[in-house]
Image (cartoon, helix red, strand yellow):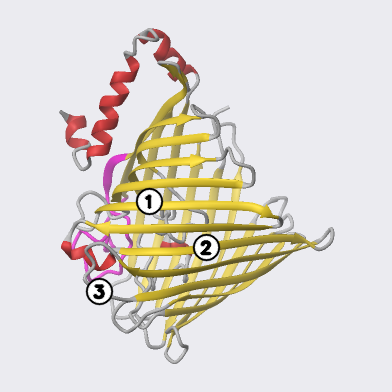
Amino acid sequence: MFIDRLLSNSVIPRALLIAAVSLTVSPTASLADGLNALIDGGKPALDIRYRYEAVDQAGRVKDADANTMRIRAGFETGRINLGGLEGIGGAFDVEWIEHIGGQAFNDTINGKTTYPVVADPDDFAVNQLYLSAVDTIPGTKVKIGRQRMIWDNARFIGNVGFRQNEQTFDAARLDITALTDWDLGYLYIDEVHRIFGRDSSTGRLELKGHGIRAQFRGFKPVTITPFALLLDYDRSSQAASSTASYGSLINAKIKLNDDVTATFAGALARQEDHGNNTGDYHVWYYNAEPGLNYGPWRFSVGIEQLDGNGTQAFGTPLATLHKFNGVTDQFLNTPTGGLRDLYGKAKTTLPAIGGIKGIKLFGAYHRFSDDDGSVDYGEEWNVGLAKAFPSRYGPITLSLQYADYEADAFASDIDKLWLTVSFKLKPK
């Protein structure tokens, strides 16, 4: 009964549970042999992360001080032969997020609105639970159930890995890698489990989503990735997010000499109303980011634009939004006037300091405006350090990051500081 209640949010995980039980008693293999193969060929998963996040936001009575811990634990099985089908397996993991000490922050569901938002509410939930078939048909992978999904740079589909509660999807996914120079994929999304947790009214998105993605590597050193993403949300309150997006990403890397490599990342997409969206519109998105790698240094500058028409704007609600348009998260929803982000980024690995090697330094600057540049929204700069310390069981990573957003005509001034300590098991 506990499992049924835990998985009652979606039909896919329940069907997955039934299928898993059925497979273990397949007449083509004994229960003992099947369980031994699944366990002996599998590997455990453990991911622990502590974070301190401090937020000073203009207009809020109090500053936020959030101490949170996330423990993610699970198991990925080995592969077995079932009824003549090879490569059958699965995986699961659960997440436990808990604040430490006093809750001096607005976690989006605790009602503490005098504090700034730190979107890490307490939760305990099944994060992933899926069956998969790898090379059952040569050059294919099928995955059905609750799963992590990241499309390319995560601009359209991502797992929001920065937050303590990961975004996962109840979905069916097919990937084909058997073709020369081509990867092909299709996915169907039934439900999205968002970072806000099970107790939030916005913690789940119910929809009928279809995604088609291809990647072509035949024009070396250029990679082209066309895609289509059709999202039709079930709830009338979310109908305005029902959209169809069609576009392509492009990436290139050219080695100029032994020390210097030129890079380019770009994208172009068109978005229009779809499904039960009552609007009638289309808007555009584009991104261009040339870069240069010199020794340990990585530099890039770019422009990213999401158009708006004053009523609707280009949106990517399933993305890892924290990765784009500044880390203070002022533009998780695109303003109706659109968004233009002019930015520069740099990162490097520092020389040894006090005998400590491998310290990474990174930072970025953003200048934001509406899509025609006539209204200045504000600017952000951020800087951070990170260092991974190897251990017998996996790396322990320590990171420190600070960001400052200065508002002109959008949102309010805000400063954020993060201190993060994480451990991720690396089974041998």
Q: Does residue 25 sit above or below 277 in this rendering?
A: above
Residue 425 included in the magenta stretch of the image: no
Q: Does residue 112 sit above or below 352 in this rendering?
A: below
Give the dominant element type of the magenta stretch: helix, strand or loop: loop
> Which residue is under mark 1?
164
Mark 3–mark 2 Cα distance, whole angstroms, equals 24 Å
Mark with earlier residue (3, 2): 2
Q: Quadrant of residue 296?
A: bottom right
Bin the neighbour count of mark 3 within 10 Å (Cα to Cα): few under 14, some 14-19, many 20 and up. Answer: some
Q: Quadrant of residue 130?
A: top left
Residue at screen point 55% across, 57% down: 225
Mark with earlier residue (3, 1): 1
Q: Amino acid at mark 1?
A: Gln
> Which residue is under mark 3?
279
> Which residue is under mark 2?
248
Residue 239 rendering spot, x and y as whole percentages: 22, 65
Bin the neighbour count of mark 2 within 10 Å (Cα to Cα): few under 14, some 14-19, many 20 and up. Answer: some
Magenta-tinted stretch? 100-126
Q: Does residue 318 sit above or below 342 in this rendering?
A: above
Q: Amino acid at mark 3?
A: Gly
Q: Helix, strand, or loop for circle 2?
A: strand
Residue 412 rendering spot, x and y as whole percentages: 35, 81
Residue at screen point 47% across, 53% down: 420
Q: Amino acid at mark 2?
A: Ser
Of residues 126 and 238, the one nearer the viewer is: 238
